[in-house]
Amino acid sequence: MSEFFKLEKTSEDSKARAGKLYTEHGVIETPIFMPVGTQGTVKALDERTLKEVGSQIILGNTYHLYLRPGNDIMSKFGGLHKFMNWDRPILTDSGGYQVFSLKDLRKMSEKGVDFRSYINGSKHFFSPENVIETQRVLGSDIMMVLDECTDYPSEFKQAKDSADLSIRWAKRAKIALENSEPHYGHKQFLFGIGQGSMFPELRKDYINKMVDIEFDGYALGGLSVGEPAEIMYEMTDLSTDILPEDKPRYLMGVGTPQNILEGIDRGIDMFDCVMPTRNARNGQLFTSRGKINIRNAKYKYSDIPIDEELDCYASQNFSLGYLRHLFRANEILGLQLATQHNIAYYLWLARTAREKILSGEYRQWKREILDIYGRNEE
Amino acid sequence: MSEFFKLEKTSEDSKARAGKLYTEHGVIETPIFMPVGTQGTVKALDERTLKEVGSQIILGNTYHLYLRPGNDIMSKFGGLHKFMNWDRPILTDSGGYQVFSLKDLRKMSEKGVDFRSYINGSKHFFSPENVIETQRVLGSDIMMVLDECTDYPSEFKQAKDSADLSIRWAKRAKIALENSEPHYGHKQFLFGIGQGSMFPELRKDYINKMVDIEFDGYALGGLSVGEPAEIMYEMTDLSTDILPEDKPRYLMGVGTPQNILEGIDRGIDMFDCVMPTRNARNGQLFTSRGKINIRNAKYKYSDIPIDEELDCYASQNFSLGYLRHLFRANEILGLQLATQHNIAYYLWLARTAREKILSGEYRQWKREILDIYGRNEE
């Protein structure tokens, strides 16, 4: 039996659970939020600041890193950890989501997907096998299988054909895993990705097939793609009902603080999203007082800290009025402080969720946060 | 007698000198380089990183801060120190240089200068008196007089008329100083600014008149405006020959590492320049191996630290190859790391100059650095 994941506790009044993931770069306490480091950096945060705000694991994007710096450079540096000076765990996606987002630049086949670089138009090919190889070069602790991310909304036939292809690819990815070795000595785990659009039976069927293949963990993909939050919660719920208890569950690309709390409530252990970093760069902050836009004129004279409740350098040491000034003046420091704050908030949210699960107060605490943030994300 | 400046040692074989400036926000060891924080932030560096790399004093721009956030907000926050969370000394310029750079947006008179905001075209007026008042609102430890920065090159008549005006303004600034009080309790010193274009007699005459007015320190302005470095050194030399020994000397807007070492050699104590920060954002690094452009393809596979010789987080922990990747990928972290490195290098340069002056090895050490950087700035 794998010692990768240990379930510590499941809530009595919900499916929320606390656990631990064991990787050779460190232990990850779940539920966890993973800051997104697309191009080998979490935008505007250096490694020590990431650690200071409590990042246990970050995400890297295979698609972007494959195109730039490319596998030759990454290999020369001995993988992504050394390249970016990050010695804690890394999860890499498979690049599928990015390739499929670029509709005009790609062509699908059973074998894989031909695509052109968004940087210079050069031709490339991703297959279930070679994205495992690229993730071997990256040396991520957790790798993801290549899948086709179905459009939303989608007809049943289209969703089923796509899901069938993704399952065939998932099998090939598992074989590629078994036929390859880590490049840098440390073990690399592989997650499957559940598809099936918004069709409950398709999702369930997919999960059963995926569980038969046996992965180290199971992600839910094709969600948070434009559907109402209630449908995302429904798909999450029915998925975690049948996923094995002893494997981690990862809801990809999610989401708002509300989404994350509802995901945890439905038995999800891992989350990633560009929201805290991207929105920070647009001046939107997630704070213990709720969501705010720092450009708002009401912060003009506000000399109170960004968020006194949050144990974070940026949140404690700089005022709302100063941060507003930095944004109005287009100063880089504004992006740095806002990003640091938002990531600190998201990690506080995941950390506190874990504490509340362990102390048996998860539902009550979730309600308190939802009272601040509103039941529905805006 | 003022306890503001104490001269500790002058070199035996040059005019280089080590001293200390005493302000109510701390002691500044000279020679010193002052990182430029135009809009209330040294671009891409937070306060603790600025301190970590050894910043003893930073510069703020009166022109920019007067326009945004403006005196009402600055006053509400209790001055620039509190606004930007910087508890060490601050020097503010008078705004003159910026106003005179915007030729189409300003109109001179004996009384002062009418100008339009570069942000929104609104009308404003700077006088020797009201820039003192704005610097009172900013609460800088060292204030500068409003002066007219003469064009380069300039006819003698034009340079003399301009210098005469600046001297009349300098007298008015001194009176404005004496007729006003600090807003926040701490003492604010005032520096005069030497003008006179590239005419030796005009410069000397100006300095004599300025010294008669009696300021806490003396800056050299109107240099590093396009003239050959040799002329700048000549103007500096003749100025420090007649400036009082017991007052600090500040060479404004200078410069390259070479310029700074030559300035120190000629008796200058203080420097500021956007070069280390601005050039960092363009990928140009000042290192212990000389000047490099990080975008150069030769750093593609380079896994050595940015600068092993420099005691700085960015320089020690990230490779040239990684920094190159960040610049190619337009990542904010690239600007952060490059800026941190360059400021660390400039502060190392000033700190080491001081050590070498105190140990009697300044000239020898200067030659070693110039051997690395080339005798002439590029």
Image: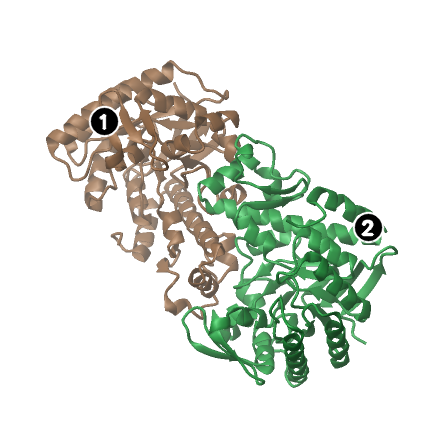
Chain colours: A brown, B green
Classify the position of the N terminus of chain B by image quarter.
bottom right
Do tag 2 and tag 1 residues touch (Cβ < 8 Å)? no
Residue B363 is labelled as 2
Name the residue rendered at 43%, 60% in the picture: A327
Relative to A35, residue A114 above or below: above
Q: Is residue B40 left or right of residue A321?
A: right
Q: Can you give x and y, in whole percent of width and height, for residue A269 in the image?
A: 35, 36
- Please tell me whether mark 2 sits on a helix, a strand or a loop: helix
Amino acid tagged 1: Met
Give the numbered dot on residue A137: none
Q: Nearer the viewer, mark 2 or mark 1?
A: 2
- Give whichever of A220, B151 is nearer the camera: B151
User: Mark on residue A108?
Assistant: 1
Provide the chain ID for the residue under circle 2. Answer: B
Instruction: Estimate the x, y position of residue B63 in percent, counting from the top left.
Output: 53, 71
Image point (47%, 52%), residue name = A336
Towards the viewer: B308 or B23? B308
Badge 1 sits on which subunit?
A: A
Query: CA gap, disc 2 to disc 1?
Result: 68 Å
Q: Residue flagged by tag 2: what amino acid is it?
A: Arg
How far across and how far down the image is residue A127, in percent? 30, 22
